[in-house]
Image (spheres, rainbow, N blue to C red):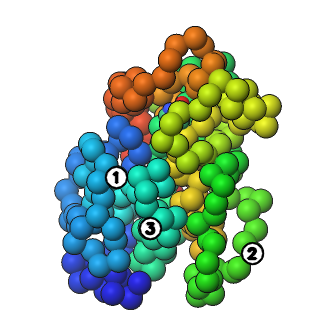
C-alpha cells in the first residue's frame, strides 16, 4: 500500500483528491472531458492489469467544478477472475489519498416494472448476493474495524442532492435497492422473481464490494445505477450486453451532467 500511494503521490504531486468516482459501463468517457493527469493501472505497483474491453483501466485526476477528483476509468470485476482484494484495492488507495466521498456508478437491470430502462436509480441500500465479502481476511485496523456497521452505507444527504439535481435537469430518476450477483451470466427469471420478493429494485455485478469497503474505511458513498434493461423475466425479451451498452450510451449525457452538478455540491 505504501508503495502504491507513494508512486501515485509522486505523479500527482500536491494534488489531494477529495472525491472519488468509479465510472461504470458507458460512462468511462466522462473522465476524458477534463484536463487531467492519468495513470494506467498497469503502471501502478499493487494494481492488477485490467483486461476488460472498452474500458481504459486508469486513474484520472482532474479538477471538476473546483473540486479535486480521482476517477477510476474502468473497474475490476469479480467475474473477470480477480480476487475481492483486487476489486476493492483502489478504494483503499483512495482512502489513503484523502478521498472523503465516493460516487459509485454502474449499469444495472431493472427488476421493478415501473423502473424503465434509461432511468437513473439512486441506491438507498444494497443486498450482497455475491456469496463473499471484500473484507474477509486479516483486518487492517488503520483502515477500519473488524465488524463494520452497515446500517447507513448510502448517504441520505447526497441522495437528496442528487434528487434535486435530477429534478432541475429533467432527468428520469428513482431510488431503490441494488442487489449484486457475481455474474457473468445474467440471472434467470426465477432468480429475478426471488430478488423482487427480497425487495431489490435493480440487479448488477459490481458496486457492492466497493461500497462495503468505502463504508468500512469511513468514506461517504453515493451509488447511482443506470438502468439499461429490464432484468430477466420482467419482459419476454432475452438479455444481451449490446442492449446494456446502447442504453448506457443514450443516458450518458444526462448522467454526465448530473455528475458534474453533484460534484459541485459535495
Ligand atoms: N443483470 C445483471 N447485471 C446487469 C444487468 C442485468 O440485467 N444489466 C446491466 N448489468
Q: Nearer the viewer, mark 3 or mark 1?
A: 3
Mark 3 / mark 2, whichever is N-terminal = 3
Q: Nearer the viewer, residue 100 or 11?
A: 11
Quarter of the figure with the N terminus: bottom left
Residue 179: x, y in percent? 65, 43
Residue 87 appears left or right of 139: left
Q: Residue at x 33, y 68 (%)?
A: 48
- SS at mark 2? loop
Residue 44: x, y in percent? 27, 74
The tally of labels here is 3
Q: Which residue is mark 1?
A: 74
Q: Residue at x 50, y 17 (%)?
A: 238
- SS at mark 1? loop
Residue 128: x, y in percent? 67, 52
Pointer 3 with pointer 2, Cβ within 8 A: no
Mark 1 / mark 2, whichever is N-terminal = 1
> Any mark on residue 147, and which?
2
- SS at mark 3? helix
Seen as rendered, the residue at the extreme right is 197
Q: Which residue is mark 3?
A: 86
Q: Residue at x 76, y 68 (%)?
A: 149
Q: Nearer the viewer, mark 3 or mark 2?
A: 3
Q: Nearer the viewer, residue 139 or 112?
A: 139
Amino acid at each position: 500500500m505504501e508503495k502504491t500511494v507513494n508512486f501515485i503521490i509522486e505523479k500527482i504531486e500536491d494534488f489531494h483528491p477529495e472525491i472519488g468516482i468509479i465510472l461504470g459501463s458507458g460512462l468511462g468517457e466522462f473522465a476524458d472531458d477534463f484536463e487531467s493527469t492519468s495513470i494506467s493501472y498497469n503502471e501502478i505497483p499493487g494494481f492488477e492489469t485490467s483486461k476488460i474491453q472498452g474500458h481504459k483501466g486508469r486513474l484520472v485526476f482532474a479538477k471538476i467544478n473546483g473540486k479535486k477528483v480521482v476517477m477510476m476509468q474502468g473497474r475490476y470485476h469479480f467475474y473477470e477472475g480477480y480476487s475481492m482484494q483486487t476489486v476493492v484495492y483502489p478504494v483503499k488507495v483512495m482512502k489513503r489519498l484523502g478521498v472523503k466521498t465516493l460516487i459509485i456508478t454502474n449499469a444495472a437491470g431493472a427488476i421493478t416494472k415501473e423502473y424503465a430502462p434509461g432511468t437513473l436509480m439512486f441506491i438507498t441500500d444494497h443486498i450482497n448476493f455475491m456469496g463473499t465479502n471484500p473484507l474477509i481476511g486479516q483486518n487492517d485496523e488503520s483502515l477500519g474495524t473488524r465488524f463494520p456497521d452497515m446500517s447507513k452505507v448510502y448517504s441520505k444527504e447526497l441522495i437528496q442532492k442528487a434528487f434535486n439535481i435530477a429534478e432541475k435537469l429533467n432527468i428520469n430518476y428513482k431510488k431503490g435497492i441494488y442487489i449484486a450477483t457475481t455474474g457473468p451470466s445474467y440471472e434467470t427469471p426465477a432468480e429475478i422473481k426471488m430478488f423482487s420478493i427480497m425487495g431489490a429494485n435493480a440487479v448488477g455485478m459490481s458496486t457492492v464490494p466497493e461500497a462495503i469497503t468505502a463504508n468500512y474505511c469511513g468514506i461517504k458513498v453515493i451509488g447511482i445505477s443506470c438502468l439499461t434493461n429490464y432484468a430477466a423475466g420482467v419482459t419476454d425479451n432475452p438479455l444481451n450486453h449490446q442492449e446494456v451498452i446502447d442504453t448506457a450510451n443514450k443516458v450518458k449525457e444526462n448522467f454526465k451532467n448530473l455528475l458534474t452538478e453533484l460534484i459541485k455540491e459535495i
